[in-house]
Amino acid sequence: MMRHMGTVVPTPPDGPLAEADGAALARIAVASVRARLVGEPLAGAVPEADVLRSAGASFVTLERRGRLRGCVGTLQAARPLYLDVIRNARRAMTDPRLPPVDTDDWPELDVKVSVLTSPVRLPAADRDALLAGLRPGVDGLLLTDGDRRATFLPAVWQRLIEPAEFVAALLVKGGWPPHGWPTGITAHRYAAHEYHDPAPRDPITG
């Protein structure tokens, strides 16, 4: 359990949301993007479901015609899940790796919300130990070394199928050499349950 704004907020179970709750969470992400694009406050975002008001960690991914337009997330639960999604949806619109999302993107913008389970420490004395513990297609992976860290969501397995390739690419992402094994690195795995609100959308006019 965690405290938020003076009240005790339970941490949700590490499992998929009910279908209706997952759809509601994706709609909140969509509404957050649209409100930011039109310059209006986000109205009616507080959900009724307790699980969406419980502490949670999420990633929000924005794509247009399969092309990444932004992906930002949180690895540790620090606020109610729906607020985490609102925060990450807005931040994904200005992912520093990409041009900002604009109204031209909106009609073809696919919005995906990934709700993360709690990270679990993996043996990582060396590269072979890590590879032996990974579950391809299931695990998200977080590598940390002091202040440096890098993560891949489980969805990345769709394009990096082999565990050795997956780990090497994540090492490069974090600024480590792709081969060998950095001293002092730690590894955690997590699962992610994805909820999708696809395009098309009505254009924003005016």
Image (tube, rainbow, N blue to C red):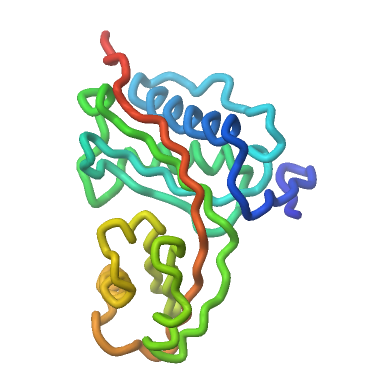
Instruction: Tell me residue 203's x, y (percent).
Output: 27, 15
Q: Is residue 102 left or right of residue 16?
A: left
User: Closer to the camera, 10 or 145?
Assistant: 10
Q: Residue visible at 37% across and 54% down? A: 155
33 to 123, vertically: above or below? above
Residue 170 appears in which quarter of the rendering? Answer: bottom left
Q: What is the count of numbered marks?
A: 0
Q: Residue visible at 68% across and 40% down? A: 51
Instruction: Tell me residue 37's x, y (percent).
Output: 33, 24
Q: Is residue 84 left or right of residue 137?
A: right
Q: Residue visible at 41% across and 30% down? A: 197
Instruction: Tell me residue 159's x, y (percent).
Output: 25, 58
Residue at far top of view: 206
In which quadrant of the rendered image does the C terminus lie? top left
Residue 169 appears in which quarter of the rendering? Answer: bottom left
In which quadrant of the rendered image does the N terminus lie? bottom right
Instruction: Tell me residue 67's x, y (percent).
Output: 21, 42
User: Closer to the camera, 119 or 104?
Assistant: 119
Q: Is residue 184 left or right of residue 97?
A: right
184 to 29, vertically: above or below? below
